[in-house]
Image (cartoon, rainbow, N blue to C red):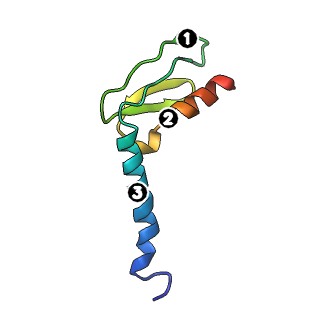
């Protein structure tokens, strides 16, 4: 079959599987300290199990949406810039 056959959905399914697995592994991911756009310092905080740090360099919160995940590595990158 061509590109529109049944196998064409597998790359999307694989991407979703990776996103779900990442969210489960990242459960409890901590939000590190950060400085907001006004220059105010905010202390770091822990997220509950099956939630993780989400947001941007200047605003962080806990959520369950793997597409909003902000890893600790990304957070440290925010601190460098």
Could you say whether the residue bearing mark 3 is in a helix, strand or loop? helix
Q: Residue furthest right?
A: 81
Q: How busy is the neighbourhood of tag 3: few (under 14 within 10 Å), some, or many (20 plus)?
A: few
**To which residue does mark 3 refer?**
16
- Can you give x and y, in whole percent of width and height, for residue 31 in the image? 46, 24
**To which residue does mark 1 refer?**
41
- Can you give x and y, in whole percent of width and height, for residue 43 in the image? 48, 12
Q: Quadrant of residue 40?
A: top right
- Can you give x and y, in whole percent of width and height, for residue 75 in the image? 56, 29
Q: In which quadrant of the rendered image does the N terminus lie? A: bottom left
Q: In which quadrant of the rendered image does the C terminus lie? A: top right
> Which comes before the other along the chain, label 2 or label 3?
3
In this rendering, position of residue 50 left or right of residue 66: left
Query: Which label number is shown at residue 49?
Result: none
In this rendering, position of residue 35 left or right of residue 21: right
**To which residue does mark 2 refer?**
70
**Height in image: 23 above or below 3?**
above
Q: Residue at x 49, y 86 (%)?
A: 2
**Height in image: 3 above or below 11?**
below
> Which comes before the other along the chain, label 3 or label 1?
3
Q: Residue furthest left?
A: 49
């Amino acid at each position: 079959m061509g590109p529109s056959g049944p196998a064409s959905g597998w790359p999307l399914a694989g991407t979703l599987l990776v996103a779900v697995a990442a969210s489960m592994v990242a459960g409890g991911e901590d939000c590190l300290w950060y400085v907001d756009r006004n220059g105010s310092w905010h202390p770091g905080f822990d997220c509950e199990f099956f939630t993780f740090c989400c947001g941007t360099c200047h605003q962080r919160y806990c959520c369950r949406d793997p597409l909003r995940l902000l890893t600790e590595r990304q957070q440290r990158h925010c601190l460098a810039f």
